[in-house]
Amino acid sequence: MNLKELFFDFLNMYVEKKASKKRVKILLKKILPKKINFNLIRLGENNDGGYLVPDDLKNIDKNYSAGVGLLTKFEKDLEEKFLIKSNMLDFNEIKKDILPKKSNFLKKKLSLSNNQNEISINNWIQEIDREIILKIDIENDEYLILANISDENLKKIRILIIEFHGLRNLRNSLFLDFFEKIVERINEHFYSCHLHINNTSKIKKLENLKIPDMIEVTFIRKDRIKNFSNEFTELPHALDQKTVFNKDEILIDKNWYS
């Protein structure tokens, strides 16, 4: 152990290799939304709990929502406006009176295991459902779930909504390696069609590149898109709302596009 390692060990800290700004920019550009042949509609609450999704909801069998909290209007909108029922999951106690009438709620944590308190994504998604929406907001566990989901279940997802957390760690080359693999797997099957920054995020910099800690991204399965143009959409979208009303909105750093 050299003097530098001894010093950081004394402070109960460690140092990892800093990620390449060029690699981070290439990766972030891969999740920027592109124009598609569907309009986007907003479902859910005003501000936090609302999401923009493609208006391609016909013949969806089920919505799966991992991470519920107290916000359930997204699932209520799907049920009341489009007759899409939801399977909802959260490890916290959720009052039944806030759930959609025809939804199923499971008090478990989405995980890699199957036991009294946990369930894996592949055990949760029912075999009978062939076309689904998957919405994930589970505070950093999204990465393991996306790595664990089977190809069969991944191909069932027509619309995928994810809140990515901990993006400050993109400055770390080990996290960047892992996140690249997750994005590559998603991009094999989906196009990004919307992105919104959670305005409670802290902004970190990798040189002059601004990286928010939390972003909400909507993807649509590639086979739903005709004549894909590869043209970026304009952000923010007209239907976007601040996640938290009393904070300034955070806009995408233009350096993501360059």
Image: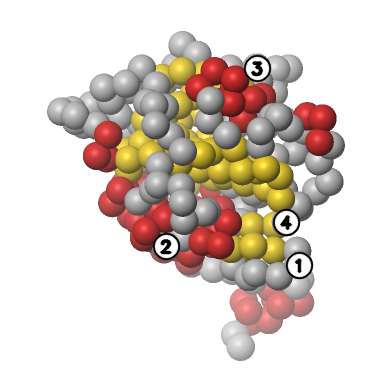
Q: Which residue is identified by label 4?
A: 108
The Cα atoms of the two marked residues, 1 and 4, are separated by 8 Å
Earlier in the chain: of badge 2 and badge 3, it is 3
Earlier in the chain: of badge 1 and badge 4, it is 4
Q: Residue at x 70, y 57 (%)?
A: 109
Earlier in the chain: of badge 2 and badge 1, it is 1
For the C terminus, the quadrant is top left
Earlier in the chain: of badge 3 and badge 1, it is 3
Q: Which residue is identified by label 2?
A: 150
Which residue is nearer to you in this view: 3 or 70? Answer: 70
The Cα atoms of the two marked residues, 4 and 2, are separated by 20 Å
Query: What percent of the width, then of the height, locates residue 73?
Result: 66, 24
| Above-or-below relation of 72 to 55 | below
Residue flagged by tag 3: what amino acid is it? Asn
Query: What percent of the width, then of the height, locates residue 107?
Result: 76, 52
SS under mark 4? loop
In the image, taking residue 153 as reference, residue 4 lies left or right, namely right
SS under mark 2? loop
Q: Residue at x 53, y 38 (%)?
A: 63
Is the Cβ of the residue at disc 4 closer than 8 Å to that at disc 2? no
The Cα atoms of the two marked residues, 3 and 1, are separated by 35 Å
Residue 146's tag is none
Residue flagged by tag 2: what amino acid is it? Ser
SS under mark 1? loop
Residue 116's tag is 1
Earlier in the chain: of badge 3 and badge 4, it is 3
Residue 46's tag is 3
Neighbourhood count class around disc 2 (C-alpha, 10 Å): few under 14, some 14–19, many 20 upward = few
